[in-house]
Image (cartoon, rainbow, N blue to C red):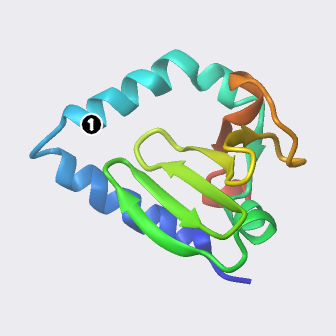
Amino acid sequence: MSDNKRLYSETSKLFIEASKVDSARYDSSIKRKDKYNKNWEKQKVNINEIVKKFARNFKVRVNNEKIMFIDKDYNVIADMASGYLRIYDNHLRKYVRKDGTVGNRDETHFKIKKRGEV
């Protein structure tokens, strides 16, 4: 199995280091984390398992504070500063739960497990 957790972690580290120069996006991400982290903690996920399930043949794209695992049917979008991810269904054009069904904001944000929790 690919170690997408490593790719995410290494890219996040580079993003955070670069943010020391231009911190607006980083600060915005941290504000979201401060506001919503309690809800995200309720749904922890292994990024490797999510990418394997939803974006098996992904291409990686980094866009500002996000790293995206882009596939034909789904995109797994992970925030590098705040440590959460979302799953986007490209056909429905909506964010989904871990089971692939459409959910509300609280149901579609997942805290990425740290290396020791995986």
Few, some or many residues within 10 Å of mark 1 (<14, 14–19, 20+): some
Query: Which residue is found at the position 73% from the left and 53% from the top?
Result: 91
Q: Amino acid at mark 1?
A: Arg
Q: Between residues 1 and 91, which one lies in front from this camera angle? A: 91
**Quadrant position of the N terminus in the picture:** bottom right
Does residue 94 lie above or below 59 as drawn? above
Query: Residue extending furthest top?
Result: 35
Q: Between residues 88 and 98, which one lies in front from this camera angle? A: 88
Name the residue carrying label 1.
25
Query: Which residue is found at the position 67% from the left and 44% from the top?
Result: 93
Q: Where is residue 42? Give x, y as percent.
A: 77, 29
Is 68 placed left or right of 104 in the picture? Answer: left
**Quadrant position of the C terminus in the picture:** bottom right
Q: Where is residue 36? Give x, y as percent.
A: 57, 20
Query: Which residue is found at the position 69% from the left and 39% from the top?
Result: 94
Does residue 52 lie above or below 93 as drawn? below
Is 93 placed left or right of 22 in the picture? Answer: right
The mark total stands at 1
Does residue 81 lie above or below 5 as drawn? above
Quadrant for residue 71, please give it: bottom right
Q: Where is residue 23? Give x, y as percent.
A: 18, 37
Mark 1 falls on what kind of element? Answer: helix
Query: Which residue is found at the position 64% from the left and 20% from the top?
Result: 38
Query: Residue extending furthest left?
Result: 21
Q: Where is residue 26? Give x, y as percent.
A: 29, 37
Is 94 placed left or right of 67 in the picture? Answer: right
Query: Residue extending furthest bottom?
Result: 1
